[in-house]
Image: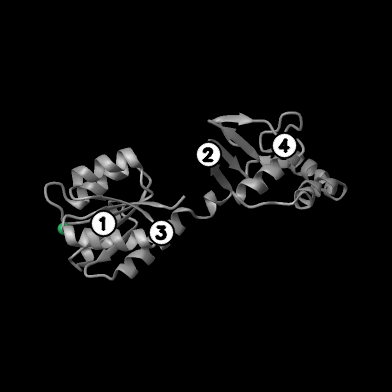
Amino acid sequence: MDPKLLLVEDEPEMLEEMHTYLQREGFRVLTACTGKEALAIARSERPELVVLDWMLPEKSGIDVCRELRQTSHCGIIMVTARSDESDKIVGLEIGADDYLTKPFSLRELSSRIRALLRRLHGPEDRSMLERDNLIISESKCQVFMDGKEIQLTPTEFKILYTLAARPGMVFTRLHLLKVALEDEYTGYERTMDSHIRNLRRKLGDDPANPRYIQTVYGFGYRFGERS
Ligand code: CA
């Protein structure tokens, strides 16, 4: 799915220019001319990133930014005609992720948007796949359907993760077999068990009900999350 952007700008010509350019660049683009409209659209459409003009009638970009931050983790690029350094600091303090001074080229805007989207989808989320009503966490070896966890064997999990990581791509049976067969090389991994045993002993962890290093049957181990 292409990233969804919301452009907030009260100058119609500029808004139209940005809209056309970014759409051509492959973004899904929503637009708003006032702060009030922007907040309403942000609530209903949940864009991944908002390009927000500082100088808006009625509600200023700063107020919109502050209100957006209370309910959303979307990326925010503030746009201003003033190049005052203190504006930049205010913008970043109230939760904007980046700051762009007018006049700027559409190409620069587009590359800033891409850079911010990359930052937002940083390494922490990379192992988490969201597909349709499924959430697949590689780091936690868990699959959720409509928010409810589904129990899969390690082999099933690896096959599902491999397929879901590249929707639409065809994998041969042989390829998937190799993915699944990784499980066969468990003998070598057994040496890890003795390390874990020693670690638990040193941490005072109860092997029957470990608090720190927990066994995930068939997968390996994980560090316990405090509830
Ligand atoms: Ca303006």
Q: Mark 2 = which residue?
A: 132
Q: Amino acid at mark 3?
A: Gly
Between the residue at mark 3 and the residue at mark 2, the CA separation in whole angstroms equals: 21 Å
Q: Label 2 crowding class (10 Å Cα cut-off): few <14, some 14-19, many 20+?
A: few
As drawn, is 227 to the left or to the right of 108?
Answer: right
Circle 1 is placed at which residue position? 91
Q: Secondary structure at mark 1?
A: helix
Q: Residue at x 53, y 51 (%)?
A: 124
Tell me what residue is drawn at x 16 percent, y 55 percent. 10
Say which element carries label 2: loop
- Camera-side residue: 118 or 17? 17
Q: Is residue 30 above or below residue 219?
A: below
Point out the residue furthest to the left here. 58
Q: Position of residue 86 (x, y in %)?
A: 21, 63
User: Of the numbered discs in the image, which one, if any, rests on residue 133?
Assistant: none
| Separation of marks 1 and 3 at Cα, in angstroms | 27 Å
Amino acid type at circle 2 is Asp
Task: Quadrant for residue 139, please give it.
Answer: top right
Q: Given this view, does label 1 or label 2 mark the residue nearer the observer?
A: 2
